[in-house]
Image: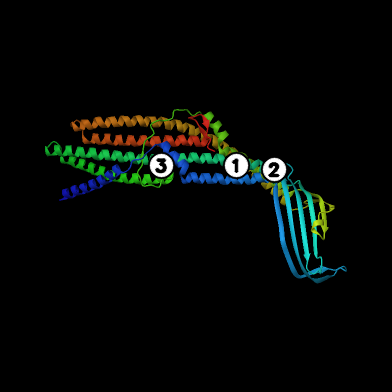
Amino acid sequence: MRRFRFIGFLIFITLQLATLVKAQEHAPLRVFTLKQVVSLAKSQSSSYRYASVLLENKTWQYKNYKSNFLPQLNLNGTLPEFNKTIEPRLTDKGSLTFINTHNANSSLQLSLGQELGFTGGHISINSQIKRIDDFQVAANGTRYSSIPYTVTYNQPFFGYRWLSWEKKIQPLKYEEAKREYLERMEIISEEASTHFFNLLLSQISFQIAKKNVINSDTLYKVSLKRFNEGKMPENELLQMELTLLNARQNLEQVALDVEGSTLRLKVYIGLVDDEPMHLVPPTEIPKFDVNEKVALEQAHKNRQRMIGFQRELLEAEQNLARAKGETGVRANLFASFGLTQQSLQFAQVYDDPSAQQRVHLGFNIPIMDWGRTAGRLGTAKANQELVKTNVEQQRINFDQDIYLNVKMFRVLRDQMEIARRSDEIADKRYIITKERYLKGGISLVDLNIATEERDKATKSYISALNKYWHAYYHIRRITLYDFELDEPLMGI
């Protein structure tokens, strides 16, 4: 009875697996290489869209900064401002009285201004016209005044010149953003290759599991024949049945792993269909050498982090300059020259205008602030030293990381070649061992060992390929250099 239950369970699993395999065999077959998967990820994945939008955002920030150095033309106006109220007024004798007001004010002003980054000043040209309508006057209650033009210049002294510091820092930030985009593209390549090899390993494991089921089924039938002929003990036949059952269970589990890995890869590269994917292992390995000195030189020249070091040091200097400019002696010069006129008629408001000039020089000298200035300057200087120390340590770590990754890349390439050869040897050994077992020359234990070693070697080879290609894209990312083509990565 127990044996019939076992055979029924075995038949059920066989039918289920046969249905799954048949469905996969009749599904449309699409073949993908590693380069195709990486290309899809770098053109339509969510990670690619995020990197593109982030770069676009940084580009607009940079354009906004550049606009500070261009003239700004503005038109301001009030059309009109109506007033009907009671307001206090100062009389000729110095007392206050309340009067009724009923008027409307209208004005237009056109201004053209320009920041001067080399001096920190601001120059502008303005033109203005105003109209007042006094409704309490019985006749001719309209007045006009005009300022045909006014040239104004405002110059701070000894203060913090924010625009000159922006001119040093903003281009570095924009260059950082472009380099960061390139690095993100290589990160996408790394992650895409990881998903690729995860699915490839699942598919190869599925193929291995199918072969194991077929081989186990063949060996079970041979063993059953030997048992019936009295040439094999029952415990060895039971062991062969258990091996077949385990092989079928493993095939079912691996089939689920294939579905899960396929879904994860599709989600990452942006595919939304339900068609299966068949991956082809990369057989052509790029042949090139990575020199530590060249890798370090290119990393220093291309990496976003190196530009970030410059920016951090400049920002520390900027904070110190801001502290000095906002706490020390400050002065401001304001000067303007222009023409003005007033008239009862609009047509005469620009006739024979009079000159108008204004000059103002203000200053602020801190006399006693109870250590506030010293404390703020001391904090800025201490932060600057802290940034310098941190940058120096990060530079050391940066160089060490490049050196170690180059060494690791070489090791992984050698390990990949060893794993490939081990896979070939293990496969040949399994074929020889299987033939000897069928002839009765060796035991089932030896055959199981050869099977396990073959499966392990194949999976180890795929794992080694995964590590190698991950390291390949990682070297590109940390140097932004294509050693295969011997040229910098240019993705923008």
Where, by quadrant of the figure, is residue 87 drawn? bottom right
Report helix, strand or loop for mark 3: helix
Q: Nearer the viewer, residue 424 or 286?
A: 286
| Amino acid type, callout 3 | His
Q: Left or right: 204 with respect to 474?
A: left
Q: Earlier in the sequence, mark 2 or mark 3?
A: 2
What is the spatial separation of the Cα atoms under label 2 and label 3, in whole angstroms?
47 Å
Tell whether label 2 touches label 1 (CB within 8 Å). no
Residue tagged by mark 1?
174
Q: In this orientation, which residue lies closer to the viewer: 127 or 40? A: 127
Percent coordinates x, y for residue 351 in the rendering: 83, 54
Mark 1 neighbour class, 10 Å CA radius: few under 14, some 14 to 19, many 20 or more: some
Residue name at image x 27 percent, y 35 percent: 451
Horizontal relation, residue 192 to residue 173: left or right: left
Q: Residue at x 73, y 66 (%)?
A: 82
Q: Amino acid at mark 1?
A: Tyr
Which mark, by number, is residue 358?
A: none
Measuring 58% from the left and 40% from the top, which residue is drawn there? 176
Left or right of 453 in this view: 79: right
Q: Amino acid at mark 2?
A: Ser
Disc 2 is placed on an element classified as helix
Residue matched to label 3: 195
Q: What residue is shown with label 2?
A: 164
Quarter assignment of residue 25: top left
x, y (%) of residue 469?
A: 43, 35
Callout 1: SS: helix
